[in-house]
Image (cartoon, rainbow, N blue to C red):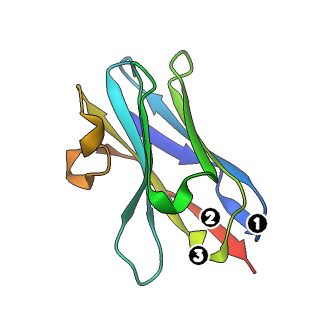
Amino acid sequence: VQLQASGGGLVQAGGSLRLSCAASGRSFSGYTVGWFRLAPGKEREFVAAVRMGDSSTVYADFVKGRFTISRDTYKKTVYLQMNTLKPEDTAIYYCAAHLGFLITGAFNREAQYDYWGQGTLVTVSS
């Protein structure tokens, strides 16, 4: 599967953005799709993930209540709605996919993801 992330941009603190991760190729229904981010000077970190089959979701603590991950299996697309953005949310956001069943406890493990998109830059100004 190939993943295409889009929707990044420049936004003021408190604003919103919606990222999209579109898949091409085979059916997306058997995947778990996650969003990770890489901020300047930091290691890549988990943001959120959703299991396409049953829409189970997991979020990093620092985005709970602000970000929402959702999926559209027909469009083979996963969305990350980001509200109340903060300057510390500035990062390159990557979507990634794992084929096959993944327990929710492993959603945040970067090594579990087999396919990665190219990333989309989110910049939040103060």
Whether residues under marks 1 and 3 lie with C-beta atoms below 8 angstroms apart, the answer is no
Whether residues under marks 1 and 2 lie with C-beta atoms below 8 angstroms apart, the answer is yes
Q: Secondary structure at mark 2?
A: strand
Residue 55: percent from the left, percent from the top? Answer: 46, 25
Residue matched to label 2:
122
In which quadrant of the rendered view does residue 104 lie? top left
Going from N to C along the chain, the mark reached first, 3 or 2, is: 3
At label 2, counting other C-alpha atoms closer than 10 Å, the crowd grade (few under 14, some 14-19, many 20 or more) is many
Residue 86: percent from the left, percent from the top? Answer: 67, 71
Residue 1: percent from the left, percent from the top? Answer: 34, 31
Q: Secondary structure at mark 1?
A: strand
Query: Horizontal placement of 54 versus 13: left or right?
Result: left
* Residue 1 visible in image: no
Q: Which residue is at a point 51% across and 63% down the rendered structure image?
A: 62
Alpha carbon distance from label 1 to label 3: 12 Å
Q: Which residue is at a point 36% across and 67% down the rendered structure image?
A: 44
Going from N to C along the chain, the mark reached first, 1 or 3, is: 1
Alpha carbon distance from label 3 to label 2: 10 Å
Residue 92: percent from the left, percent from the top? Answer: 51, 65
Query: Horizontal placement of 8 versus 113: left or right?
Result: right
Picture quarter with the C terminus:
bottom right
Residue type, mark 2 in image? Val
Going from N to C along the chain, the mark reached first, 1 or 2, is: 1
Residue matched to label 1:
11
- For discs 1 and 3, the disc positioned in front in the rendered view: 3
Residue matched to label 3:
88
